[in-house]
Image (cartoon, rainbow, N blue to C red):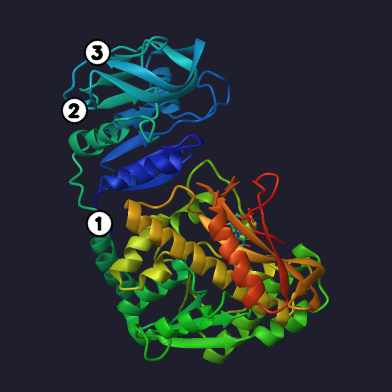
Amino acid sequence: MVNEKVLVIDFGGQYNQLVARRVRECNVYCEIYSYKTPLEKIKAMNPKGIILTGGPNSVYEEGAPSCTKDLFEIGVPILGLCYGAQLIQHVLGGKVEKAIVREYGKIETEIDGSKDALFNGVSEKTTVWMSHNDYISKIGPGFEIIAHTLDCPVAAYQDTKRQLYGIQFHPEVLHTVQGKDILANFVKKICKCSGSWRMDSFVEESIKSIREKVGDGKVLLALSGGVDSSVAAALLSKAIGKQLTCVFVDHGLLRKDEGDEVEKVFGAGGMFDLNFVRVNAAKRYYDKLSGVTEPEKKRKIIGEEFIRVFEEEAKKIGAVDFLAQGTIYPDVVESGLGGESAVIKSHHNVGGLPDYVDFKEIIEPLRDLFKDEVRKAGLELGIPEYLVFRQPFPGPGLGVRIVGEVTEDKVRIVQDADYIYRSEIEAASNEYKKKHGEEPSWMPNQYFAALTNMRSVGVMGDERTYDYAVALRAVRTVDFMTAESARIPYEVLEKVMNRIVNEVKGVNRVFYDLTSKPPGTIEFE
Ligand code: XMP
């Protein structure tokens, strides 16, 4: 599908997905592969260039991730980053040793060598991000040093004849001020990529290749209303129209009005040509969840019930040729199929694959895209912005935002409180944006209301109440693995509290959750 490709060979470093992101920001398509990938496979992919990533090991240790000399003889430009740079030297006659001074953080680097290739347009003295214990103490024959720092004699090197380049620092990290220029120089000037990878061409080419693959076959997709499955549905619909059936399971644990919003966009009379089946399974879920208080048990029930409902619908539809999924690139890498730095987040998917759906093959049209690329594709396909820029919403839905037993009444309370909270945050943020031209610094990356299982005495008018307490959660986070509570202005919180206790029946107290993650989690279950 894509004819210009750069390969990122993963040696286990923490920034490796970032390397791929930055390359794609240069409009050059790239994919991540483990260092264990056989050389024949690498050659068969016909890459325009290869980047060897960083990694936590020392190249000279026994059993450290490595590669053979042959990799450097396939005739395409290769750039090693950190561990990758050390590995090239280790294999090709240089020397790597434990550094006397460990460099970590922002360091000033001086460019000594020619600025024709990697450092074209880069300032003589530039700040870079270093993170290494080992250093290259001697370079192998044929190489020349092109940058150094106070403690690192070989901050970068090259051999323009063999087209081999290495940098000790991390150009993919934003702290490396001209990192993007350096990577762009590599993929465009050295690898000679044209930089024509764009979302509109992705959408166009995907539609073509889906048509070729599916032919006149039938495709079934579980649509959750989240960004990924919505974009997958839109793409498939543009490609094959009514050969696609989307099953949308409304488990009664969605945000306020969300089920209707999804139906409005994807259902009959909506924006897309497809068969849309909405299953209103709320009652079924509430029955199954009745009396269950243990969080993991609730999650399990919700996941299993999803599979059951989906299978029942699939049976009604009969055999299909393809089961479509909204898998995106970080899912592929994180499940250990792509790169080397695998983090498995099993709890992030509702229930896994349904066992008893009769299909021949899986189709994953977004498998090569990062989240923000999926969003761009969504906009390209005409999906409304409010759907494309939705905040993350967990598969088990409000089931993980109600502490204790889930009941229909509690779902109503949390939906209404959450709706008020989200509207007020959006209003306050829009007002700020109008005044200052940018988002407020407190703007959370995820925010929602949850229902605690605590009831306490209050007073409303002249009446004594004995009602629930709502918890407001808002976090600032980059990767959702760690987070801190967002510093939402007190006036906004006060307004939200006032509206919730006045407008939502069954609530007489509102708390703001200050807990960071760790020790808390982002969700509240
Ligand atoms: P926690 O609560 O683990 O959440 O700090 C981290 C991020 O993951 C989301 N999350 C889920 N997403 N299925 C999902 O699709 C799940 O079961 C699930 N649990 C948590 C959560 O919203 C947050 O963004």
Verify CB contact (< 8 Å) between mark 1 and mark 2: no
Relative depth, front residue between 518 and 213: 518
Task: Kindly identify the residue that appears in the image at 49 percent across and 39 percent down.
Answer: 36
Task: Kindly identify the residue that appears in the image at 42 percent across and 57 percent down.
Answer: 371
* The quarter of the picture showing ligand 1: bottom right
Give residue 342's quadrant in the image.
Answer: top right
**Position of residue 266 in the picture relative to residue 359 (left or right):** left
Q: Dot 2: what SS? A: loop
Q: Is mark 2 within 8 Å of ligand 1?
A: no
Instruction: Give the alpha-carbon distance from disc 3 to disc 1, as whole Å.
Output: 35 Å
State whether residue 241 is above or below residue 118.
below
Residue 207 numbered mark, or none: none
* Residue 170 in sight from this viewpoint: yes
Relative depth, front residue between 154 and 405: 405
* Callout 3 amino acid: Asp
* Callout 2 amino acid: Gly
Task: Kindly identify the residue that appears in the image at 82 percent across and 69 percent down.
Answer: 457
**Tag 2 residue:** 121
Verify CB contact (< 8 Å) between mark 3 and mark 1: no
Q: Earlier in the sequence, mark 2 or mark 3?
A: 3
**Tag 1 residue:** 198
Residue 112 numbered mark, or none: 3
**Which callout, 1 or 2, points to the residue nearer the camera?**
2
Give residue 303's quadrant in the image.
Answer: bottom right
The picture places residue 473, in percent across and down from the top left corner, at 62, 58
Instruction: Give the alpha-carbon distance from disc 2 to disc 3, as whole Å.
Output: 13 Å
Badge 1: residue crowd in 10 Å (few <14, some 14–19, many ≥20):
some
The picture places residue 2, in percent across and down from the top left corner, at 27, 55
Q: Earlier in the sequence, mark 3 or mark 1?
A: 3
**Which callout, 2 or 3, points to the residue nearer the camera?**
2
